[in-house]
Image: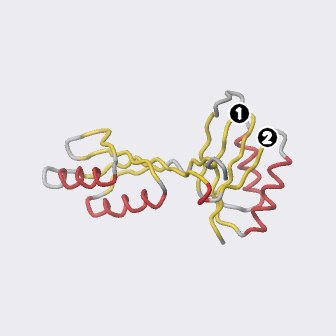
Amino acid sequence: MNRHILSILVENQSGVLSKVSGLFTRRGYNIDSLSVGETENPDVSRMTITLQRDEQDVEQIKKQLNKLIDVKKVMELKKEDSVCRELLLIKVKADIKTRSDIIGISGIFKANIVDVGKESLVLELTGASEKTDAFIEILKPYGILECHRTGITALKREGS
């Protein structure tokens, strides 16, 4: 099974997310990540859904999505033809001894420090999932207190 990224344009109204996610649930497909937000048109939202399925399953789900009244357009995005990003907020233990190390690591990854506490730092990182994964792995020895990832948000590149 391969990872697939679906970009779905839908009517921006209540109940649409439930209908789309329900379609995945009824088929027994797990959604790895889901990102939803208003587009340049306030009447339209874009859903970016990632899932691990084979080609045949993804084709079937695309056909089913296109049958939903609130769905305007369904596109499968190929990683090489798209810009894909994820947002990570992570709270890490940071005492006097480790704080400068964590700040140094944050600089290397171009992460922002968004909150400073007596015994922790909250860091913000935006980038590809692989970058986010690497950042989490490097911070694990310091003690991750909390972590939240938004899931992938993606747009097709021009000319692709």
Name the amino acid, label 2: Lys
Is residue 63 toward the left or the right of residue 40 in the image? right
| Mark 1 burial class by Cα count in 10 Å: few <14, some 14-19, many 20+ | some
Note whether 38 is above or below 8 in the view shown: above
Dot 2: within a 10 Å radius of its alpha carbon, few (fewer than 14), some, or many (20 or more) residues?
Answer: some
39 sits to left or right of 91: right
Give me the residue at 77% from left, 65% from top.
Answer: 57
Marks 1 and 2, how far apart in space?
9 Å
Q: Secondary structure at mark 2?
A: strand
Left or right of 60 on screen, residue 123: left
Residue sticking out furthest to the left? 97
Q: Position of residue 5 (x, y in %)?
A: 65, 56
Tell me the amino acid under the disc marked 1.
Val
Say which residue label 2 marks: 72
Residue at 78% x, 58% y is 61
- Label 1: state its secondary structure: strand
On-image quarter of the N terminus: bottom right
- Residue 52 badge: none
**Residue 78's x, y, as percent?**
64, 59
Q: Position of residue 34 (x, y in %)?
A: 61, 49
Decide: marks 1, 2 in contact (CB < 8 A)?
yes
State whether residue 44 is above or below residue 81.
above
Q: Which residue is mark 1?
A: 44
Q: Earlier in the sequence, mark 1 or mark 2?
A: 1
Between 57 and 147, the residue placed more toward the observer is: 57
Query: Total label count?
Result: 2
Query: Residue 147's x, y, as percent?
Result: 41, 51
Please, which residue is most extreme toward the bottom here? 1
Q: What's the residue at 74%, 47% (across, down)?
A: 20
